[in-house]
Image: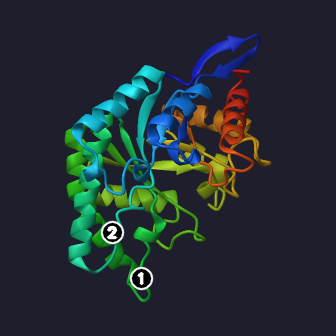
Amino acid sequence: MGSPFSRRQGDFQTMAFKYALCSEVFSTPLSETITQIAMAGFDGIEIAPFNAADSVEEVSADQRSELRRQAEDAGLEIVGLHWLLVSPPGLHLTTDDSSIRARTTGYLQALARFCSDLGGKVMIFGSPKQRNLGDGQDPRSGFDRAAEALKEVGQTCEDLGVQLLLEALSPAETNFLQTIEQAIELRDAIDSPGIGYMLDCKAMSSMPEGIEGTILQHGKDAGHFHANEPDGKGPGMGELDFTPILASLAESGYDGWVSTEPFDYKPDPATVAAAALQTLRKAAGAE
């Protein structure tokens, strides 16, 4: 993308990020969602695979080409994927059932091919329910199983020019990978250019250094960034000030997308989308 610092307005240096919106905000067919996100003024779309099909293996080559063409025609970049393991059912990363882990590895590889076919570059691995440690499960054993399952995924991603990005989440959401440091430890154990980590405002609000402190410490090497409120609302729908957050991103050397991932779509998706984009652009000094 180039440096996030791009131009000056008087004595104030503005930050030129590119902004994406997650597809599940609009409960419409993906082709319609692409149009709506483009009309809202975003630069990109981040796709939840279940918005395309219960399994991306059901999406034909022609359908993938058509989705990519629709996005290009609308002036949108397909940034990548998130909410990777919501469907199909029965997938899990840390389970001691080797057959389930094998299916999970296989589906993540299928997602990497889907992402690449769409022109995407990142896959955000959140999926808290599909990675949680089971009752009585040894955390180190779960860590080792996750690393083993993701090694093949990392190689596939590397071959395709895609990155699987580990998303640390709050203790309220998961008992596995609750801090950026833990995500980095898993990334390093896998040791593949196809595996990285990302940052999420909602998740960072529960971390020891807070949102801005965590960004300053880990933003430079982060592969992606989610903008949202600690309570799950979108930017501009709560109390969070995104000006110091985006300033911290720029200061850290982060050079990727700023993608809005709200979990609350009230009062309606169009309002949530508009508020997010206006809030982020204003915070970056572009409005």
Asked whether residue 167 is in view, the answer is yes
**Nearer the N terminus, badge 1 or badge 2?**
2
Disc 2 crowd rating (10 Å Cα; few below 14, some 14-19, many 20+) is many
The percent coordinates of residue 229 (x first, y second) are 69, 51
Q: Which quadrant holds the C terminus?
A: top right
Relative to 115, say whether 233 is above or below.
below
Image coordinates of residue 135 in percent, x first then y, are 44, 87
Residue reaching furthest right?
239
Q: Return the residue at label 2.
A: 91
Q: Which secondary structure, mark 1?
A: loop
| Residue 203 picture quarter | bottom right
In the rendered image, the vertical position of residue 45 relative to residue 127, given as above or below: above
SS at badge 2: loop
Q: Nearer the viewer, residue 110 or 68?
A: 68
Left/right of residue 157 with respect to residue 123 in the rendered view: left
User: Camera-side residue: 244 or 271?
Assistant: 271
**Identity of the residue furthest to the top in this view:** 10
Q: Residues within 10 Å of mark 1 (few under 14, many from 20)?
A: few
CA–CA distance between discs 1 and 2? Answer: 14 Å
Identify the residue at image location x=65%, y=38%: 273
Residue 221 appears in view = no
Q: Residue furthest bottom?
A: 136
Q: Nearer the viewer, mark 1 or mark 2?
A: 2
Left/right placement of residue 41 relative to residue 60 reads right
Query: Is 113 displayed left or right of 225 in the figure?
Result: left
Q: Nearer the viewer, residue 11 or 67?
A: 67
Residue at numbered disc 1? 134
**Residue at left 68%, top 27%?**
281
Identity, as a three-letter code, of the amino acid under mark 2: Leu
Q: Which residue sits at x=32%, y=31%?
A: 66
Residue 11 x/y as whole percent: 76, 13
